[in-house]
Image (spheres, rainbow, N blue to C red):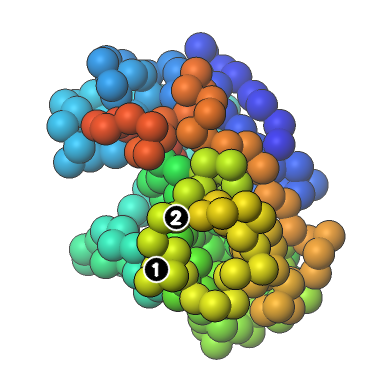
Amino acid sequence: MLRKEKNGLSWLEFEIFQEFTHLKHATSLRSGGVSSGSFGSLNMGLDLGDDEKNVTENRTRFIAAINNTNAPTPDVISGLQVHGCHVAYIPEALIEAPTADGLMTNLRQKALFIKQADCQAALFFDPVENAIAAIHSGWKGSVQNIYQKTIDCMRQTFGSKPENMLVAISPSLGPDSSQFINFEKELPQEFLPFQFKPFYFDFWAISGWQLETAGILPHHIEIASIDTLTNPQDYFSFRRDKPTGRHATVIWLI
């Protein structure tokens, strides 16, 4: 991943998307905002205990930093994330925020906005059909294989082919931080090969396996492989700290 900074605010971009000049994307880090305490400082999550004005200012700063100079501000669209596997299409006129852990569109200036702290945020881009998706996936999303469902939805909605799609996954809980004491009840049998020591699972590898099984080419996948739990300077972590803030991962077509 590439680390960038503007006006004291830092964020990450994926190398796999750099050649596409009509595509904007980023994953926020935790510095450069106005929130304080356990939400310090670039908290992107509402309804966590942080002041709503602070979150609004943080989001405004983040979008402004990664947007092109003098470019119009995109419509920022965030769904109600419930650790499910529903992927919602974002139309030109959106009446209310969808209850969905996945958002997809082929319209310009629609910034698909995912919030996360330890969970994976995945960005999908089909450069042939010019369509995008942004996905929130914790372990429950992995169990439901939301990535397979995203590919299916993009195929049905836009005519996307898996072999044309590019996928990038944000910093998230790393293998050495992914302890599941009750894995026999919580995780399916097919995840057992990814248990590399007692009670610990490699969800980065699980995601790569799910994507490749769904038809995404290996060289079209970029996984950040950065552990949010063990990097408190840059990342909020729900497993490490409660309460805590949220990061944002965003993508839009310009």
Q: Which residue is mark 2?
A: 180
Residue 82 lies left or right of residue 161; in this view the side is left
Q: Quadrant of residue 57?
A: top left
- The amino acid beneath tag 1 is Glu
**Residue 165 disc label:** none
Q: Looking at the picture, does residue 19 appear above or below residue 69?
A: below
Q: In this view of the protein, can residue 44 be seen by the observer?
A: no
Label 1 close to label 2 by CB (< 8 Å): yes
Residue 240, located in which quarter of the rendered image?
top left
Instruction: Check disc 1 and report its element: helix, strand or loop.
Output: helix
The residue lying at 44 percent from left, 70 percent from top is 184
Considering depth in this image, is 59 or 107 the residue closer to the camera? Answer: 59
Residue displayed at 54% across by 25% down? 231
Q: Residues within 10 Å of mark 1 (few under 14, many from 20)?
A: few
Q: Position of residue 185 (x, y in %)?
A: 38, 71
Q: Distance of mark 1 from mark 2, alpha carbons? A: 8 Å
Of residues 156 and 74, the one drawn nearer to the viewer in this rendering? 156
Would residue 55 be found to the left or right of residue 197 on screen?
left
Q: Is residue 200 above or below residue 86?
A: above
26 in relation to 222, above or below: above
User: Camera-side residue: 145 or 111?
Assistant: 145
The image shows residue 19 at horizontal and vertical percentages of 79, 47
| Residue for badge 1 | 186
